[in-house]
Image (cartoon, helix red, strand yellow):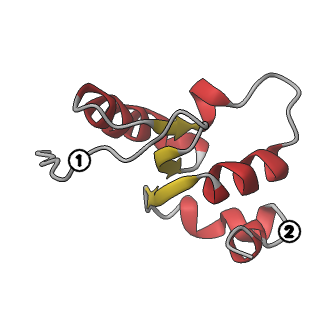
Amino acid sequence: MLLRVSGAPRGDRDGNADFFMSYTRSDQLGAEWISWVLEDAGFRVVVQAWDFGPGAHFVAEIHLAARHSSRTIAVLSRAYSGVGVRHGGVAGRVGG
C-alpha cells in the first residue's frame, strides 16, 4: 500500500491534532502504520492505542479526540461497520 501525504501540519501547541485515527481493534496494525507515516511527515495524530490512557472512558476519549483534531481518518473494514452498534451508537454521536 502506498500512502501519499500532502499539505502542511496544522496541529497546535494547545493540544489540537491534525488527525484523529478512528479504527477497530482488528484494524489496529494498519491504523498504527498510517499514523506512523503521518507523524513521520510532521503531522500530529491521536491514536487510541497510543494516546488513550489505561482505564480512560473510551467514549469520552473518542469525543475529545474528534473535537480537538482538524480531521478524522477512519480505517474502514467489515469489523468497523459494526462498531456503532456495539458501542451504543458512538459513531453517530461523536460529531455532535
- Mark pair 2, 1: CA separation: 35 Å
Front position in the image: 92 or 78: 92
Rendered location of residue 38, percent (x, y): 29, 37
Whether 23 is drawn above or below 95: the answer is above
Pointer 2 residue: 88
Q: Secondary structure at mark 2?
A: loop
Residue at position x 26%, y 33% from top? 37
- 57 relative to 76 in the view: left or right: right
| Quadrant in which the C terminus appears | bottom right
Nearest the viewer among 34 and 68 is: 68
Q: Nearer the viewer, mark 2 or mark 1?
A: 1
What amino acid is found at the position of numbered circle 1 in the picture?
Answer: Ala
Mark sitting earlier along the chain (2/1): 1
Residue 84 screen position, x and y as percent = 72, 69
Name the amino acid type tagged 2. Gly
| Residue topped by disc 1 | 8
